[in-house]
Amino acid sequence: MKTTFPQLLLKHAAERPTAPALREKEYGIWQTWSWKDAAETVRHMACGLAALGFQRGQNLALVGDNRPHLYMGFIAVQSLGGVPVPLYQDAVASEMAFVMEDAEVRFVFTENQEQVDKLLEVRETQPAIAHIIYDDPRGLRDYDQPGLISTEKLLALGAEWDRAHPGAWEAMVAQNQPDDVSVILYTSGTTGKPKGVCQTHASFIASAQGGVEVDGLNPNDNVISYLPPAWVGDHLFSVAQWLVAGFTINCPESASTVAIDLREIGPTYYFAPPRVFESMLTSVSIRMEDAAPSKRWLYAKCMDLARRVGADILDGKPVGLWDRMLYRLGDIAIYGPLRNVLGLSRLRVAYTAGAAIGPDLFRFFRSIGINLKQLYGQTETCAYVCIQKNRQVKLNTVGQAAPGIELKIADNGEVLVKGVSVLKEYYKRPDATAEVIDANGYFHTGDAGVLDEDGHLRIIDRAKDVGKLNTGAMFAPNYIENKLKFFPQIKEVVCFGHSRDQVCAFINIDYEAVGNWAERQGLPYGGYVDLASKQQVLQMVADCIAQVNADLAAEAGMADTQVARFLVLHKELDPDDDELTRTRKVRRNFIAEKYGVLVDALYSGRSEQFIETQVKFEDGRTGSVSATLKILDAKIHAPAKAAA
């Protein structure tokens, strides 16, 4: 099907004009745009941009939370032959400035006063930004800077321009081709400055069609769009699949109301990175710790049963009649109410992507009847390389090659990809493009993996992160970190070990989960730094590590990678401090350099180390936080003997 996103929108508007396309919760009430409404809004937004001087081939930046006007803004820009460039809404002005300059942005669509203030700051160093269109007028009444215009005025301007230029917009839509660049998505910058990934209409539409085909996505599906619009996963989910399948996307009232809005919507299709599922499990664990003893006992018994047979029942595998009956009772008493509390009771299929998900976390959700599957890909592949099909889910793989994708493992173990989803190029970076796409057209993912006998791909780690201990054992830090993050008390982990004698780790506790536990223990604390230094908390973390070490000792070739020593960091790792990317991936090399004194302390046998760290606050101010961190030895287990 040779088409573009604006043409797909017009097709739905013609065939299903009154069906709901988008919803937004505002002031506690859900507002709905039909496909006809959406097409008309896109038309007027596009014509308004044309009236302001926006031209084919120009880039327009979008900054904001998930809002109908933002998603329609993508299509409006594309309809004119322009290219939308979404930015992370929590990015600071300096991060925005780099993208604005690199993408030569003159037009910006933004959400509210907070974002306008950042953009006005950016414009001081990037004067080429001529027009800033804002969606929410609150707080902006007295702003009189040049180039500021509300969405409301843009739509009115567009309606007037459209009347004065009959047929002009349709002609511009008709000019667009499937191989035109439809979006520039900037990478998260784990290894340096972000690069602009140029993807075409054809690549994202083919990727969306593959997902629609595998999971039977259809116009009756409902999704909640709450992930950063600058993330490739949200673009696949809330733009490409929305326009291909024709389902309804629902925008929550705010980031803080997502859990409530999720329960109200009851999506049939859901997409989230592992950290969201980790957060869900943490909230469940906190609730159960506060529950009555009888309920905790019932929950523990039901979860033991679910871990044993739940995933097999979901996959249609043989399970004994007695266990099936007990599971049915467990579904009435525990699993069903739990899915309802999480807002996932109507769910038909759920996906996770963006980072590896720990097998234990994966098993938990599948065991309670949630059809959670993995999607594997990168920004450079529309988040679309492998997809897990129903009843073919393996906990330790990311599935088989998706429709239209060819997989190959290089001699060095790197995963190579060719097919419909591969990027057209990096924006203005032919050198970088040539580095990742070889002469045979294969994209080099940078991930190390293996294919099993069924063609399922198992990702070991980032190829650059996989190393070796001095013992010769393979060191895959992400694998160990995900095992530790299954515990609700642990929010983030950074493991070290390459070219070392043993593995050591930095730990971030989950402040909410550990704080809840401390309150029930009658343990007073005065903030994160104080809580993280408590001896009882350190012992709790040590117990978690001991359990993971026992698992590693039982796995072939992993016994040497048990965590030998650890410390609990005095601050949470934060994107604003450059320790995490905006998609919350660990910037491992940066952390190792920034906290070199702590790494040295771990490996030199010290029992404590003082550190003072510079931090950035949300309002742009800087400060420092200091502490003397205790360094503890972890319990190491003897390797399990291989069966004779």
Image (tube, grey):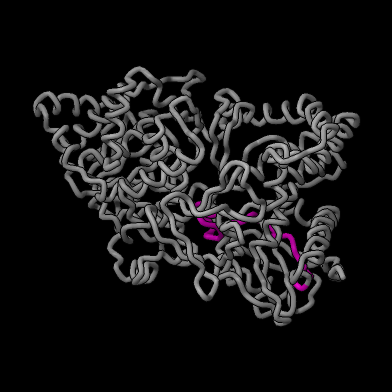
Q: Is residue 379 above or below residue 23?
A: below
Residue 566 percent coordinates (x, y): 76, 66
Report the front residue among 641 and 105: 641
Residue 630 location (% of width, % of height): 79, 65
The picture quadrant where one finds residue 40 is top left
Quadrant assignment for the N terminus: top left
Q: Indicate whether residue 227 is drawn in magenta.
A: no
Count of numbered badges drawn on the protein: 0
**Does the image show residue 258?**
yes
Q: Is residue 522 above or below residue 626?
A: above
Q: Quadrant of residue 196?
A: bottom left
Q: From the image, which quarter does the C terminus lie in?
A: bottom right
Q: Is residue 505 left or right of residue 155?
A: right
Give the left or right position of residue 637, taking residue 155 as reference.
right
Foreground of the two, 280 or 514: 280
Residue 578 painted magenta = yes
What residue do we see at 34% from left, 66% from top?
433
Q: Quadrant location of residue 637?
A: bottom right
In front: 473, or 72?
473
- Inspect this view and state whether residue 622 appears: no
Residue under the point 57% across and 48% down: 374
Along the line of sight, the residue nearer the viewer: 64 or 294:
294
Residue displayed at 55% across by 36% down: 270
Q: Position of residue 83 (x, y in %)?
A: 27, 47
Which residues, given as a range, are shown in magenta? 560-583
Residue 539 spot, x, y in % from top left: 85, 57
Residue drawn at x 44%, y 35% as measured from the top left: 66
